[in-house]
Image: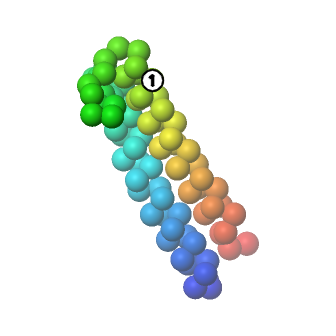
């Protein structure tokens, strides 16, 4: 494995870890039904929207990380 490939795989792993935390934060927001957005606590539909955005953002990070790993795996 070349050093460039190793660094790219390390970067993908470092992107996946915060992605997991963002997904967990979004799921917790959905479960609680309230979130802090720009310093204010919101509830109801706005909190659900914020939770969904967090979940989608975190899943996007995870998917991108998996795609990078899949593209750079040895053949």
Task: Measuring from the top left, give residue 2's x and y in whole percent.
Answer: 62, 85
**Where the N terminus falls, by quadrant?**
bottom right
**Which of the 4 image quarters holds residue 72?**
bottom right
Residue 4's place in the image compared with 35, above or below, is below
Residue marked by disc 1: 49
Residue 59's place in the image compared with 69, above or below, is above
Residue at horizontal 63 percent and vertical 61 percent from the top: 68
Outermost residue toward the right in this view: 75
Outermost residue toward the top in this view: 44
Residue 74 visible in the snapshot:
yes
Residue at horizontal 41 percent and vertical 15 percent from the top: 45
Colour option used: rainbow
Residue 8's place in the image compared with 27, above or below, is below
Residue 32's place in the image compared with 44, above or below, is below
**Where the C terminus falls, by quadrant?**
bottom right
Residue at horizontal 53 percent and vertical 63 percent from the top: 12
Q: Number of callouts in the render?
A: 1
Q: Secondary structure at mark 1?
A: helix
Q: Alpha-carbon neighbours of circle 1 within 10 Å: few (<14), some, or many (≥20)?
A: some
Task: Measuring from the top left, give residue 54's x and y in whole percent.
Answer: 44, 36
Left or right: 19 in relation to 37: right
Left or right: 26 in relation to 69: left
Residue 28 visible in the snapshot:
no
Task: Measuring from the top left, give residue 67's x and y in whole percent.
Answer: 64, 56
Task: Measuring from the top left, give residue 10's x and y in whole percent.
Answer: 50, 71
Left or right: 52 in relation to 43: right
């Amino acid at each position: 494995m070349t050093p460039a490939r190793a660094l790219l795989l390390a970067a993908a792993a470092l992107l996946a870890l915060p992605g997991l935390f963002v997904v967990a934060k979004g799921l917790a927001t959905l479960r609680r039904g309230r979130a802090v957005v720009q310093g204010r606590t919101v509830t109801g539909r706005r909190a659900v929207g914020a939770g969904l955005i967090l979940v989608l953002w975190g899943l996007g990070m995870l998917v991108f990380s998996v795609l990078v790993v899949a593209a750079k795996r040895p053949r």
